[in-house]
Amino acid sequence: MVQKTVPDVTDHSAGNQINFMIMQYLKVVETTPGTNPPLVARWWFLFGCLVWNSYAVMDPKFPFVDGFEATRCPLVPNATETQKWDIMLQLLQACYAGLKATELPNLPLIVLPPNTLPLNYVSNTFVPAVNAYLATRAQDGYNTTKPYTYPNQSSYIQVGTNTIQNLNIDLPSPSTWAPLDTHYPDGSETKQKPVAPYYSEITNWLSPDELTHMYEIAERYYPTSTIFQQQEAAMVNLAATLTEAEKLKAEIWAGTTRGLASPPSKWMVFIALLIASNSMELKETAAIVGGVTFSLFHAGICAWGVKYKYMQPRPIQVLRRDYLGQQIVYPITGQLGNGGAWLPYQQSNIYTPGFPDYVSGHSTFSMAVATFLQMLLGSDTIPIYSIIDISYFQAIATMFDTTTEPSMLSNLTLPPKCSIVDPNLPTVPIDLNWTTWTGLAREVGISRVYGNIHWDNSNLGGLCIGQWVGTTMLKKINWDSLGLNIVILGK
């Protein structure tokens, strides 16, 4: 079947219905002012918690999560999926109203279908519970603003001039990451603001001992000076020898285009496909959406905590410093140029993320979700076997235009000249094969090395921390007690 992009009114499976909600929610969070990857992960966490807790008020086997409190309103034991969904939709309408009022003003309200069962429980009990929960989360520290003093408050890129910067002079501490300030020939300047330096302080589910262990994992992948020099040389060589497939993968997973899916949201696209293509029922949908968003949120907390502990500089900063006056290959043009003005392949001549290099958020988010799904579903195989409408791919990356054919994840072909970064690429069709969760996570992680945005240690450390996050989140819930009956096509 061709994957639906809107709910089928005759299909009351929660998987089909919440599939649409996820894609709608994605557009809202990715266009909300001030968005950034860890904040997006937090908004998905709120979505997942509200879906989970909405189902939990009807099913006493589900524990309330994240401090949510409400009197239970159990379903009739023999209620049909249609009846369950009619009630759930009323609960989700209340959740959306609360999110719209507190955090996401552009979120469209859910319009209830006719003949929905009236429930006084919603207005008298559930709405106050939702509002109390969101009021608590609004004070969790996500919007904390404090003065942050960097070791090096300066700039390290100039555009359109013949002046090559000497970063050993321009940056007081050139070996430590600094926000990217860009200077233009007309004298104007764009000052980059650091993204979420205090994100690791947000209220979360990890104990002090668990966080200590997470930082111990991070320490294993923080390079010695010798290893850092080796991976710097490897980056110069990689930038000069990138294949077309590597360049396309860097572009697919970049997550830098406003309105399209950032790293956390890209994974929610796959969750929308998973629950819809398998027509999952309400209980299983709530469990998967909840568990995945719990993993994304804590992956963001861990990654950003590590980033601001180590302050590792990104390739653009290090290569410009160390190869000043030397000729190295610019990966976009393939031509030699002064290392002091070197540019990474990804994304443009003024782009680099507004936070330190180590660890990679892409790698951490991705392996956290992949590990969680692999363990919950009992298989690493991605169980999405339907032909997927191109609109899902278009939410992931700009290169998937209207000429891209609907495809299966295991057999997706990128047509020639679909790249936005380099319109001449690829010169021949490029085949992608997304068949396992962990394989997909590794591709996302290494894509940031291909894009010259992250060092190898940032990818490897992020994958390892992400694996720990996914495993840890699975242990936070007694999944066996939920009575799940996850039926996966082909399993």
Image (cartoon, helix red, strand yellow):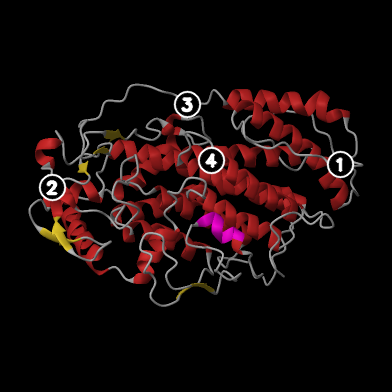
Left or right of 409, for residue 227: left
Q: Earlier in the sequence, mark 1 or mark 4?
A: 4
Disc 1 to disc 2, C-alpha distance? 71 Å
Asked whether residue 172 is in view, the answer is yes
Q: Earlier in the sequence, mark 1 or mark 3?
A: 1
Instruction: Check whether the beta carbons of the residues at disc 1 and disc 4 lie within 8 A of each other.
Output: no
Secondary element at tag 2:
loop
Identify residue type, mark 1. Answer: Leu
Q: Is residue 461 above or below residue 424?
A: above
Residue 127, position in %: x, y?
76, 27
Please give the residue where the numbered disc 1 appears in the rendered image: 75
Whole-percent x, y for residue 112 in the image: 82, 40
Q: Of the residues under marks 2 and 4, which one precedes in the sequence? A: 4
Q: Nearer the viewer, mark 2 or mark 3?
A: 2
How much space separates mark 1 and mark 3, taking CA atoms? Answer: 38 Å
From the image, which quarter does the N terminus lie in?
bottom right
Magenta-colored span: 391-396
**Of the image marks 1 and 2, the number of the one nearer the N terminus:** 1
